[in-house]
Image (cartoon, rainbow, N blue to C red):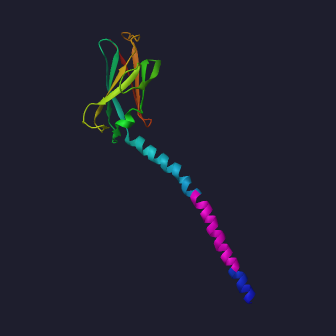
Amino acid sequence: MSGDSISAAILTTASVICAFAFIAAVYPSVITAGDPIMSRSDAMGDQIRTDTAILHETVSSDGMEVCVWVKNVGCSQISSGLIDQSDLFFGKKGNFERISYDGSASSTPSWSCSIEQGGDNTWDTGETLKVTIKLPESYAFESGEKYFVKFNAYNGISEEDYFTVS
């Protein structure tokens, strides 16, 4: 009888130890499996809160610069450190290219920007971003031709527009 009690106690102790070992091995995997879901959920939330609208485009008199005004119409603030991670596409309809960001505007083609209102380095809701595209001297605008501009924010939210030069 006492041998059965000792055997039962040993088996119970061994079962508890195995259960804890199993939990210790599986629990971290279960927790980290949720990390990508949470990460994607955060990214989707950021995309839902971000929205932009292209208000107007204009070409300088010498044809070397294009100014594009983009308004933050979402409910998310965008820091200036994230703006330069955005992509800008520009060119004739059907023949456009990605333009690289260059805050100093020393290379061509390149784009730079400034926040027109506010006075801080955050692109807040309702504020307008002035994007200046600097073009190479060899670039020639054609009257009546359609031109394409697309502003793609750092998180994939984009806005595009076509305009003509008269």
Q: Is residue 87 left or right of residue 66?
A: right
Q: Is residue 150 left or right of residue 56?
A: right
Give 56 or 64, whichever is nearer the viewer: 64
Image coordinates of residue 29 in percent, x first then y, are: 59, 56
11 up-or-down from 93: above or below: below
Q: Is residue 8 something that shows in the picture?
A: yes
Image coordinates of residue 3 in percent, x first then y, are: 75, 86
| Residue at horizontal 58 percent and vertical 61 percent from the top | 27
Q: Quadrant of residue 151?
A: top left
| Residue at horizontal 45 percent and vertical 44 percent from the top | 43
Quadrant occupied by the N terminus: bottom right
User: Does 18 appear in magenta?
Assistant: yes
Q: Is residue 129 something that shows in the picture?
A: no
Image coordinates of residue 23 in percent, x first then y, are: 60, 65
152 up-or-down from 45: above or below: above
112 up-or-down from 22: above or below: above
118 up-or-down from 4: above or below: above
| Residue at horizontal 48 percent and vertical 48 percent from the top | 39
Image coordinates of residue 146 in percent, x first then y, are: 40, 16
Q: Which residues are magenta?
A: 10-28
The rendered magenta stretch, by its main secondary structure, is classed as helix
Quadrant occupied by the C terminus: top left
User: Does 85 appear in magenta?
Assistant: no
